[in-house]
Amino acid sequence: MFKKQRTVKAAITFTGVGLHTGNTCTITFKPAPPDSGIKFVRTDLKDQPWVMADIDHVVELSRGTTLQRGEAKVYTVEHVLATFAGLQIDNMIVELDSNEPPIGDGSAKPYVDCLLEAGIENQDVDKFYLEIDTPMTFSEPERGVDLVVTPSDDLRITFMIDYKNPALGTQYTTLVDLEKEFVEEFAPARTFCFLSEIEMLKGEGLIKGGGLNNAIVFYDSDKGQVEVDRIRNALNLKDEAFVGETGIINDIKLRFPNEPARHKTLDLLGDLLLIGAPFKGHVLAARSGHRANVALARKMRELYKKKKFASKYSKGDRALIDIDGILKVLPHRYPMLLVDRILDLVPGKSVVGIKNVTINEPFFQGHFPEHPVMPGVLIVEAMAQAGGVLLLNAVENPETKLPFFVSIDNAKFRQKVTPGDQLRFELEMQAFRHSTCKMTGKAFVEDKLVCSADFKAMVVDR
């Protein structure tokens, strides 16, 4: 896997018809600077609005992945994104003069050929890989969908599909090495559907640009040619169609014996690019589609945000963020820095931090010399500082921001804290709007609750 970020060397275009909208679209790939990600730009709209290719902008998953930000809406992006994932491209400006990229032949090959013709170059900035440390899962038992990601030194995918159709049946495939396998073994795999689905898809306003030249159609009826002709006539399809002997309409030859499983792997690659970073892990997928893929990508993006934040502000191996990282995030200094370590952080949701209380704390000189007890107001302050790490994680460029707490409510003290205790703070974010957030917090010594409070805070520029 490449260590440096990558983009295309020069601009290049490709024109075709969108699968679902049927709209003609010219797509232009342009180089983008490091750390800028994948940006789709609608050049046909006023002011050329754009949308980033990340999980936060997914709005629809009906037979494809749709992104939207304001007026910028782009349908069926998964084949484009799979191309970027397979070629390990990190940064790209993707201009479109319509709302859906061309479907081409139903695979990622046209995009791959286009980008390889333009050339791909390494940039001077290192990639950040999301490394999977412990297994992650997503499942839909009612649909028999299972997704598991396990630790691996590289990206690997094992995909199994299981359809009740003799022409398709049970298939599986494994992608082991992107550099060696993607271009020749997976990019050419075409999208597919069943004959019985065509009427339903047309009825939903989809596959307006679909045809036998850009999709494999599997026969799943017992009525023979009569059913094929009925569907052709009902939908006014121009393509000639016959049942054939292989179980595929028109006996279209598969590029691989397990081409459908390979195409599902292609879709999964594209959907997981929405994490926002390449990853190292082995994905095992059973009967998964866009909805499940994106659900897994959401979980992986949360882990990515946590690890990215920690890698930027800490180098410790026993904590998510060690004291060096805390000093980079929080503005507090001695004697008012009251958090020693961040053990866990779920971006935008929760944080766990600790404070080791020793007799050397300056406040014990006066509170109280004969009976040292940590002041309740400082327990609340320490808890608020842990919350400040959570708050700053939710904003861009946290090192340029300050967290100010504007209110503390419902503070309760249940047990004294003395030298030798280790305080553990657990805070959850309840709401975050317009740079202002609400949090609830608890402080424990071992398993005993010693303090709880509700906080309201805001972020301002330093």
Image (tube, rainbow, N blue to C red):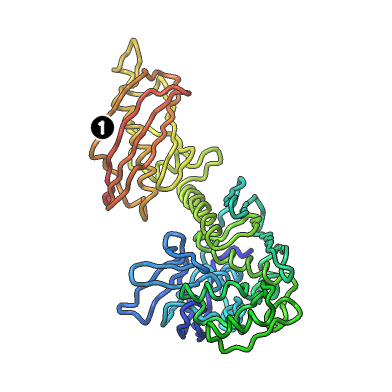
Kindly tell me whether residue 333 is visible in this rendering.
Answer: no
User: Is 354 above or below relative to 324?
Assistant: above
User: Is 305 above or below relative to 290?
Assistant: above
Q: Residues within 10 Å of mark 1 (few under 14, many from 20)?
A: few
Task: Identify the image quadrant of residue 263.
Answer: bottom right
Q: Position of residue 430 (x, y in %)?
A: 34, 42
Tag 1 secondary structure: strand
Locate residue 401 relative to residue 184 in the image: left or right.
Answer: left
Q: Position of residue 336 (x, y in %)?
A: 32, 33
Q: In the rendered structure, which amino acid carries the disc numbered 1? A: Asp
> Which is nearer the eye, 163 or 402?
163
Kindly tell me whether residue 82 is visible in this rendering.
Answer: yes
* Residue positioned most to the top: 370
Q: Position of residue 286 (x, y in %)?
A: 65, 57
> Which is nearer the eye, 31 or 457?
457
Quarter holding the N terminus? bottom right
Number of numbered discs:
1
User: Is 7 above or below relative to 349?
Assistant: below
Q: Residue at x 67, y 59 (%)?
A: 156
Q: Residue at x 31, y 27 (%)?
A: 378
> Which is nearer the eye, 34 or 207?
207
* Residue positioned most to the left: 406
Q: Position of residue 424 (x, y in %)?
A: 44, 29
Locate residue 252 relative to residue 98 in the image: left or right.
Answer: right
| Residue at the disc numbered 1 | 409
